[in-house]
Image: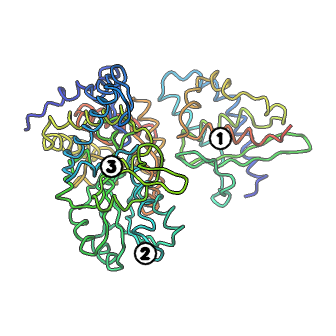
Amino acid sequence: MTLEQLLADTKPALQEIQTRDLADIQQASDWQAKYRILMQLGKKLPPMPEKMKQQEWLVKGCESRAWLMHYHDKSTDKHYFILDSEARIVKGLMAIMLCLVNGMSSAELAKFDLCHKFDQLNLKPYLSQSRGNGLTAMAEKIKACCPAA
Amino acid sequence: MSGFDVQQFRSQFTFFQLQPDWVYLDNAATMHKPKAVTDAVQRFYQQQNSNVHRGAHQLSQRATTEFEQARDIVASFINAKHRHEIIFTSGATAALNQIAFGLMHTVLQPGDRILLTQLEHHANIVPWQLHCQRHGIHIDVVPLNSSLQLDLAAYQQLLLQKPKVVSFSHVSNVLGHIQPVQQMVAMAKAAGAITVIDGAQGVVYQQPDMQQLDCDFYVFSGHKIYGPTGTGVLYGKTALLEQLTPLLAGGEMIEQVSFVNTTFNKLPFRLEAGTPNIAGVIGLGAALQWIQQYNNNDLIQHKSLLLKAFFSGLAQIKGVDILSMPVHNAGIVALNVDSEHPSDVAAMLDQQQVAVRSGQHCAMPLFSYLARPGAVRCAFAAYNTLDDVNRCLLALEQAVEILTA
């Protein structure tokens, strides 16, 4: 599988999360419901082939391993991402992160406030957790994809 | 049944009164502190708070007396021959670092070998690796057998290579398995090796007797035996402590200083540079004194009751893969749920206010041997109850149900 194919497969999944699932997460009545949705989100993303899970894409600081690949379309100045994680809940949370930033321009990405967005979705506690779940490391890695202004 | 009353025991921990909804099973990471300990620490700061060994006033003298009393308490707790064989450190990790650093060039020479085991915590691997690589010392590793116990036949074979130092844990921090330390020390001594025991998980299970065990070094952390964080003990036999090069220098460890030469103070001060964690050490003394009111066999029996209930409950939950053995177990159970990642399981337990740890527990070589990405670790303490066991089992069932839906 090529990066282009994977990007093409990931894009609609992220769009679907953006348009359909975010509202469900926000309205989940209890943690069980929320976690069920999160695990579903992770499943929607195409898995990254084992071969592609290289050290350079590894997100450091996770109890579970996660990988983030980034593609910057310079002609349109848009950023696209692919991710995978060993852990399902973390993958779901990371998928939410990605759907928020996928397709952003460099300027949009630079000023994007993930904390604020997660707060709106009632997901902020997961961000502020210790390095354990790796979400903070993932957020930093996404930000680092932004070319220096 | 013993006369042990778990509710009476538990009632001495303020945490459980303030946080009654939590099931705390992360005891191998750190334990809760009884009021005897938090009171001792608070009293020190509120009523004494002076530096030790140097003040020109009575407050300092009193602080010194209490600090040194804590050394006596530790010495008596582990039955050390001499009080100066107790060195206070910031924890087991600091103690192991001091030993590994301190033996280089004094005992260990280029070309020598040392022996570790497959199930060590990183703190009993990396300090050795760091110094051994620089000094050209070879590290051998005792493998595990199929029941995840140390392979003693292989150990015997490796001892034939005449390692100068053998360092192993009393209790595995992942599996909870109690190592046959008495036998392992005897075998190492017969081969002429210096023995180091990482007692971080062992000391709270069974009060170790230094003179009976006859190991050369034994280390542990205070916070894993009801004491404050930032405290630890490095026990060593006098002759070997004398040979350790101090890892940290400055302050009380010095006798004479000029820019040409410095001579060091005598033991134990030689290995205790800088202002020690005075309040912490006093708290550790209070912890060890407090726990000795109880009969350790009662505590062991209570924990084995919890383990038995937990193991039989786990057997009823479909898809649970238990790594730990129920026998020779100090109270730790490492497990996984089918092919699920342990962090998912732990996250769901967390949502149900069951505190466990997930991951590789600072023992990556063990997990690469086990070929698993990690495990969920449930570590029981004497203040845990059968209700804790049941709540953890119910939470696990719920997690399995959601994960496998």
Q: Judge left or right: residue B42 versus residue B261.
A: left
Quickly name the residue at label 2. B112
Question: Where is residue A47 drawn, in percent x and y?
Answer: 63, 50
Q: Tell which of B261 and B71 is nearer to you.
A: B261
Mark 1 closeness class: few <14, some 14–19, many ≥20 residues within 10 Å: many
Q: Say if residue B319 shows up in the picture.
A: no
Mark 2 closeness class: few <14, some 14–19, many ≥20 residues within 10 Å: some
Quickly name the residue at label 3. B268
In the image, residue B336 sits, relative to residue A97, either above or below, namely below
Label 2, label 1: how many angstroms apart (C-alpha)?
44 Å
Q: Secondary structure at mark 2?
A: loop
The answer to whether tags 1 and 3 share a subunit is: no
In the image, residue B210 sits, relative to residue B230, either above or below, namely below
Q: Amino acid at mark 2?
A: Asp
The answer to whether tags 2 and 1 share a subunit is: no
Quickly name the residue at label 1. A138
